């Protein structure tokens, strides 16, 4: 595994079906484009949509925890949160945030492909 393991914010939502799921992904991709992606150390945002249409997990990857902390300290948090709320209010269906109070993670272990033991 690479020595630089990165830093992640993992955000999860429950939705009422595929239409809301798709709309949530589009809205939150736009938020990443408008509010986050130009910060130093931002790597990507990956949106995982459950095959049953009921969940969206957004994994935001940062090069380091320091980069993420810098983003937290210098970004327009109030503006971004207002944009998130506006996006949620504009969705076609019901959404429930499953975000924990501290959705920040470090990779502590990884396994990869290899021979059977």
Image (cartoon, rainbow, N blue to C red):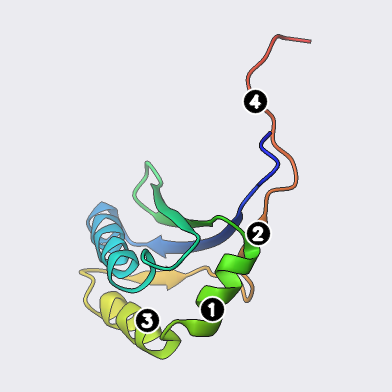
The disc placed on residue 112 is 4
Neighbor class of circle 1 (other Cα within 10 Å; few <14, some 14-19, many 20+) is few
Q: Is residue 75 above or below residue 27?
A: below
Mark 1 or 3: in front is 1
In three-dimensional space, the C-alpha distance between marks 3 and 4, rounded to whole angstroms, equals: 36 Å
Q: Upstream in the sequence, badge 1 or badge 3?
A: 1
Rendered location of residue 6, percent (x, y): 61, 52
Residue 58 visible in the snapshot: no
Residue 96, by quadrant, is: bottom left
In three-dimensional space, the C-alpha distance between marks 1 and 2, rounded to whole angstroms, equals: 15 Å
Rendered location of residue 79, percent (x, y): 35, 87
In the drawing, does residue 2 fall left or right of residue 74?
Answer: right
Location of mark 2 (residue): 105
In three-dimensional space, the C-alpha distance between marks 4 and 2, rounded to whole angstroms, equals: 19 Å
Question: Is disc 1 placed on a helix, strand or loop?
Answer: helix
Q: Upstream in the sequence, badge 1 or badge 2?
A: 1
Q: Nearer the viewer, residue 16 or 69?
A: 69
Location of mark 3 (residue): 80
In three-dimensional space, the C-alpha distance between marks 1 and 3, rounded to whole angstroms, equals: 11 Å
Q: Upstream in the sequence, badge 3 or badge 4?
A: 3
Neighbor class of circle 2 (other Cα within 10 Å; few <14, some 14-19, many 20+) is some
Residue at x 66% of width, y 37% of height: 2
């Amino acid at each position: 595994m690479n020595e630089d393991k990165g830093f992640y914010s993992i955000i999860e939502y429950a939705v009422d079906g595929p239409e809301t799921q798709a709309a949530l992904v589009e809205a939150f991709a736009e938020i990443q484009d408008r509010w986050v992606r130009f910060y130093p150390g931002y790597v990507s945002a990956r949106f995982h949509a459950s095959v049953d249409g009921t969940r969206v997990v957004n994994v935001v990857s940062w090069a380091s925890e320091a980069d993420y902390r810098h983003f937290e300290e210098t970004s327009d948090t109030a503006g971004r949160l207002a944009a998130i709320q506006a996006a949620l209010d504009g969705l076609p269906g019901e959404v429930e945030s499953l975000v924990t109070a501290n959705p920040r993670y470090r990779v502590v272990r990884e396994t990869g492909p290899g021979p059977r033991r």
